[in-house]
Image (cartoon, rainbow, N blue to C red):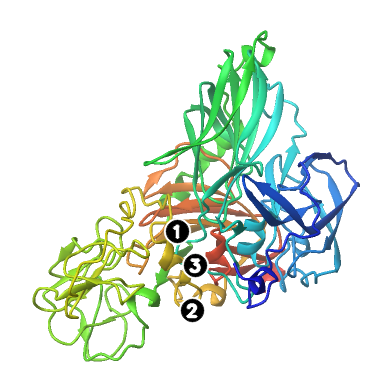
Amino acid sequence: MNQSNTNGQDGLFTTETAGLPEVASPGVLRLRDGDRLDLRIGPVRKRLDSAELRMLAYNGSVPGPNLHVDQGSEITVQVRNDGDVEATVHWHGLRLENRYDGVPDETQVPIPVGGTYTCKVRFPDAGFYWYHPHIREDFGLEMGLYGTIVVEPSDPGYWPAADRQLTLTLDDLLVEDGHIAPFRKSGPTFVAMGRYGNVMLINGETEFSGQASAGEVVRLYVVNTANTRIFNFAIRGARAKLVGGDSGRYERETFIDEVLLAPSERAVVDVLFDTPGQIRLEHRTPDHTYDLGAFTVTEGAASDAAGSFGVLRTDPELAAEHQSIGHDIERPPDKILAFYSLMPLLYGADDTPASAYACPMHPEVTAAEPGTCPQCGMKLLAVPAGAPASYACPMHPEVTAAEPGTCPRCGMKLLAVPAGAPASYVCPMHPDVTAAEPGTCPQCGMKLVASDAPPPAAEPGPGAAHSAHGHGDGLEWEDEMLEINRVSDSSNMIWQLIDRKTGAVNGAISWSFTVGDRVKIRLVNEMDSDHPMHHPFHVHGAGRFLILSRDSEPEANLVWKDTVLLRAGETVDILLDVSNPGLWMAHCHIAEHNQSGMMFSFNVARDREQAR
C-alpha cells in the first residue's frame, strides 16, 4: 500500500499504527442504578497473526467493555469521540428514551472528533443487548466499535439455573496486505454483498480459549456483530439449550445443535459440560466449518444447575401471547414493506434508451416507453433491439431460458443473449478478458458473460472458479463475487425498502403509530430484485416485535425480537408492539446496505391526541 493511502490521503481513512496504544483486553463493568460510565472512542493497535492493524475501540478494547446492569436501572454515559469520524452510540435493542437512541441528526447532533456527548441509558427489559456506532456504521463496526450489555432480570427465577455466564461476540474482518481493507471517506463500498471478512473473530480474537469443569453449566450470551456475515454457531461435544433471544427468554426452551444468527441478532445458550476434554466452538456453513476455539473441560462434580439442565421450561407470558395472536396471524397486514434492489453496475442504468420495454416478471407486458407493469408494479426493462434468442444468467452462463426470468441457482435476473450463438464470452469486470467458451475470469474469478464481440485468438488461463451462488436456502454464506462487490457503492448498487401500499422508498416512507398499537407488518424480500439477497431487518426502540409467520407458516416458538432475518424470496409477518414515543429508525442491519440508504424513520405518538 502506498504511503498516501496509509496516511489517510487519497480519500481513504488512515491505516497508520505508529504511536497508537496497544489494544486492551475487554473487561466487565458492573454498573448500578445512577452510576456514570465514561466511554471513549479512540484508535488502537492490534496484532492479528502477522498483521498489525489500526482499529477503533471503546475504552481501549475490542470488543468494548461488557456492561452488566440491573433491569429497571438507568445510568449516565459520557461519550468522548477521539476516533476518525463523527460519532454517535446506538444502544441496540433497548427501549430507552428516544433522544438518546443515537441516530445522527434525528435524535442527536453527531459528536465531532474531539467532542463529547452525555446521555441517559435505561434498561427496562432483561436480556442481552449491545452498542455500536450509527454514523458510518460500515466503517465503525469493521474497525472494532461494538460492546455488549447483559441486563440482569429483576425476577431471580427468570432464567434457568447456571453456574456462571460469558458473553461472546462473533465477527469477521477483511485483512489485505497487512491492513484492514481500505474504507473511502466519501461513503461505503462493498455495497452489493456487504463486506465479508477473511478472518473470523470471537471476542476480538482469532481463537477462543476457555476453561470449564465437568458438571458445570455456563450461560453463553452470543451476538453477531459482523457487518454482513451470518453465523451458524454450534458447540461440538457438549449439550446446548436455547433459552433466550434478542430481548429476553423464549416461549419454550429447546435443546439445539446450532443457532443461526444474522448481523445484530442475539442468542442466550446454556451449555452443560458433562465430560472432560476439548469442546469446540464452530461456525457451520453448507460448504465449510470454521473452528472458533474451544473450552478445555477438566474433572469436576455436577452442580445443582447441571441437575436441572434437562428441564425445558415454558414462559407463561409468551405462552399467553401465543394464544392471543391467532387473529393477528390471520388478519391482513397493516403495512407491507418490500426489500428490493437495482444493480446498474451489472445491468446498466434504468434510463438506458430502448425501442421497447417489458416486465421482467410478465414478459407479455410490453410498452414503447418506460413505465411499470399493471400486473405487479415492477419497472419495465429495456428490451435489446432485435429478438434475443435466449436469456442467460451473468453468474451462471450455462443457465439459459427462452424467456426473461431469474436464475434458479442464484436468483439473478437473466440477461438477453443476442440471436445466434454467442461469438465470445467476456468478463463483466474486465472487458479485455474474453474467451471463445464459457469460463471464468483469471483476474477476478467472475463467470464470463455471453457477448457478440469476436472471439480471441487464444484462451485465457484458468481462473478462480466460484462455487454456486447460494445453496437454495436464500442465504449468502460467503462473498461469491468479491471483485464486483469491491467496486460497488451507493451509485451503482441501489438497495431499497419500499412501502408497497404507497410506493414510498427508503427515507420517503412515512409511517405514524401511537403507543399501544400492535402493528402487523408484512416483510417481503422480493426475488424480482436485480440482486436477491438475505436481509436482517432491525427496528429501533419504539417497541419490540413477535414473528407471526414465515412464508405463511406460523412461528412455533415465540421470542421478543428487534431484528429478523429475511431469506431471499421469503415473506415474514411480524407484530410490532408499540410502547415508546418518539422518532424511530428501521433498517437493514447489513452495515453497507443501511449506510447506502436502506433505512427510514417512523413516528410514534404518546397518545391519540398527540397523534392528531
Horizontal side, residue 313 vs residue 343: left or right: right
Q: Which mark is residue 191?
A: 3
Q: Which residue is mark 1?
A: 522
Mark nearer the N terminus (3 vs 1): 3
Quarter of the image that includes the N terminus: bottom right
| Residue type at numbered disc 1 | Arg
Dot 1 alpha-carbon crowd within 10 angstroms: few under 14, some 14 to 19, many 20 or more: many
433 and 31: which is toward the camera: 433
Residue at position x 56%, y 66% in the image: 594
Residue at position x 31%, y 81% in the image: 372
| Residue type at numbered disc 2 | Ser
Q: Secondary structure under badge 1?
A: strand
Q: Which mark is residue 82?
A: none
The alpha-carbon separation of the residues under discs 3 and 1 comes to: 25 Å
Horizontal side, residue 61 vs residue 450: left or right: right
Residue 366 drawn at (x, y percent): 20, 83
Q: Is residue 188 above or below residue 468?
A: below
Q: Which residue is mark 2?
A: 491
- The answer to whether any part of residue 163 appears in the image is yes
Residue at position x 45%, y 44% in the image: 326
